Image (tube, helix red, strand yellow):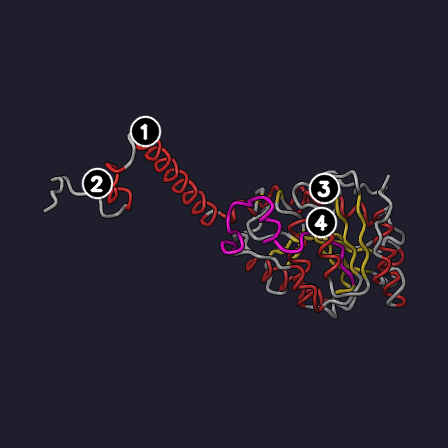
């Protein structure tokens, strides 16, 4: 009858079972320490991987959203220095900041509205360059709205796809109830998510969309930054822009940065190719990265976007047909 050691193995590991079953005695002496080291190293790697997996799953929204916070008083002071006033939705909830249109065309009733959804860092008041850019395009009849995400700037709440989309939908519905002036959407990086979401939710009410360094889906963007993890299974906020745009047939402009390492331009190109609308244009600034696009008020991108929107509004075709998606010249 076989004799067993008095010390009992740990039933939780196959390694312990092998050790106490006499398996180790069958191996040449030089293999024992090597196998033992490899197994211990493998076990450490697995434990570290599982720990990182848990951290990524539990704290994923901290990796997605990077808000800057302001007190209400600070935000209001900063906003009024730029000629902005608080913007509220139909329920009286703070939605962001608005700048009224100016000029004779606005007075004459030819006013147009544009809602800007900013990227995942900072807050809405960091994006006043969109106001300068639209002001530089004649006629100056743009009323600009800088949407603020829950948990960003001075807005209460916590950011997530669910809370952002609910707030964006409520704010958009409030604008529709104000009057019938056309509404355009601008989505910057992460902001492409709510912009595409609204275009899909209100395809007949959105007059046009401009996406700046967008992704086709947050899942594909996350896979680039975390290739070793099953992000497709972990992500709670998905922002599937391709699916959202399937019902939108209005004019769409996509601007990408050729050297973008945050949201590589191929994701924006993929979104362009899969967007359902035939009225679309893709522009790339080949030498720019994610944060160095030429969005100065003097840049040609502003007039390019507005001219495309205008052309599509007039005849529903022309520059936006599927064969006209060639890369536009880079802004000087």
Asked whether the beta carbons under mark 1 and mark 2 sit within 8 Å of each other, the answer is: no
Q: Is residue 2 visible?
A: yes
Residue annotated with mark 3: 81
Sequence-first tag of 3 and 4: 3
Residue annotated with mark 4: 266
Residue annotated with mark 2: 22
Circle 3: element type: helix
* Residue toward you, 327 or 94: 327
Would you call the spot at circle 3 few (<14 residues within 10 Å), some (14-19), or many (20 or more)? few
Residue 260 pos. (x, y %): 70, 41
Sequence-first tag of 4 and 1: 1
Q: Is residue 331 left or right of residue 39?
A: right
Asked if residue 128 is positioned above or below residue 27 in the image, the reply reads below
Asked whether the beta carbons under mark 3 and mark 2 sit within 8 Å of each other, the answer is: no
Sequence-first tag of 2 and 4: 2
How far is disc 1 from disc 2 in space, using C-alphas? Answer: 16 Å
Q: Name the quarter where the C terminus is drawn.
A: top right
């Amino acid at each position: 009858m076989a004799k067993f050691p008095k010390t009992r193995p740990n039933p939780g590991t196959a390694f312990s079972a092998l050790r106490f079953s006499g398996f180790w005695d069958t191996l040449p002496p030089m293999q024992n320490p090597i196998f033992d080291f490899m197994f211990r190293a493998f076990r450490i790697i697995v434990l570290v991987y599982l720990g990182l997996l848990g951290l990524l799953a539990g704290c994923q929204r901290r990796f997605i959203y990077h808000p800057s916070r302001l007190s209400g008083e600070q935000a209001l002071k900063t906003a009024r220095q730029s000629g902005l006033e608080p913007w509220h939705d139909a329920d009286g909830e703070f939605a962001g900041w608005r700048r009224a249109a100016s000029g004779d065309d606005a007075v004459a009733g030819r006013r147009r509205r544009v809602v800007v959804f900013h990227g995942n860092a900072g807050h809405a008041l960091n994006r006043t360059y969109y106001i300068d850019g639209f002001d530089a395009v004649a006629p100056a009849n743009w009323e600009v709205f800088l949407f603020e995400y829950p948990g960003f700037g001075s807005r209460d709440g916590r950011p997530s796809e669910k809370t952002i989309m609910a707030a964006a939908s409520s704010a958009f519905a409030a604008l529709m109830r104000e009057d019938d002036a056309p509404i355009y959407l601008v989505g910057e990086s992460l902001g492409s998510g709510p912009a595409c979401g609204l275009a899909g939710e209100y395809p007949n009410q959105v007059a046009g969309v401009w996406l700046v360094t967008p992704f086709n889906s947050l899942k594909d963007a996350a896979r680039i930054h975390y290739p070793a993890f099953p992000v497709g299974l972990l992500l709670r906020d998905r922002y599937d822009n391709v699916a959202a745009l399937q019902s939108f047939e209005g004019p769409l402009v996509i601007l990408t940065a050729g050297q973008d390492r945050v949201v590589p331009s191929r994701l924006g190109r993929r979104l362009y190719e899969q967007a359902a609308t035939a009225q679309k244009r893709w522009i790339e600034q080949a030498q720019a990265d994610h944060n160095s696009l030429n969005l100065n008020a003097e840049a040609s991108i502003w007039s390019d976007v507005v001219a495309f929107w205008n052309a599509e509004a007039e005849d529903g075709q022309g520059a936006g047909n599927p064969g006209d998606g060639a890369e536009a010249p880079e802004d000087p």
